[in-house]
Image: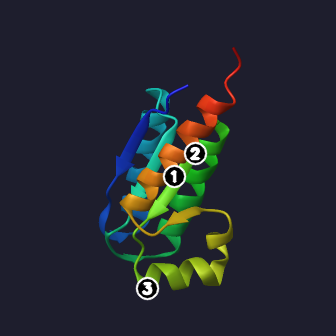
Amino acid sequence: MTSKIHVFEPSGILNATAGNELRRQITDILNNGFNMLLIDMSKVSFIDSSGLGALVGAMQSVRNAKGELFVCSINEQVKMLFELTKIDRVLNILSNRKEFDSKVLELENRQTLFKQP
């Protein structure tokens, strides 16, 4: 089965307002059949507790839909927040989009390898 991928690129501050929009978009995307999502945070300058809650909610929604969620390109502030809250232990965090592309290829190859005849 081929993954249907969607990439989000939030920018600025990921707070309550942006977090609610992110959750809404993820729900819409999952309802449209996407099963692999990447949140590229290269343009996010700051994340507060509401933004963190939105990411956790997004992760739960994607898991409930049997999909996969990845986050990439986090800055030092976001990295520190993820480590302090231990969210880095449950999110699939990648360095950048290149690493995401490699991960997708690896997952696709694994699915093909174990596909039943």
The image shows residue 99 at horizontal and vertical percentages of 44, 61
- Read off the residue under disc 3: 76
The image shows residue 51 at horizontal and vertical percentages of 47, 67
The answer, for residue 80, to whether it is visible in the render is yes
Inter-mark Cα distance, 2 to 3: 24 Å
Q: Which residue type carries mark 2?
A: Glu
Which quadrant would residue 113 be assigned to in this image?
A: top right
- Does the CB distance between marks 2 and 3 fall below 8 Å? no
Dot 1, how many residues are within 10 Å of its Cα: few (below 14), some (14-19), or many (20+)? some
Q: Earlier in the sequence, mark 3 or mark 1?
A: 3
How was the colour assigned to the protein in this rendering? rainbow
Dot 3, how many residues are within 10 Å of its Cα: few (below 14), some (14-19), or many (20+)? few
Q: What is the total number of numbered labels drawn onto the structure image?
A: 3
Which quadrant would residue 86 be assigned to in this image?
A: bottom right
Q: Which residue type carries mark 1?
A: Lys
Residue at 61% over, 81% down: 83
**51 in relation to 25, above or below:** below
- Read off the residue under disc 2: 68
Which one is closest to the eye, mark 3 or mark 1?
1
Dot 2, how many residues are within 10 Å of its Cα: few (below 14), some (14-19), or many (20+)? many
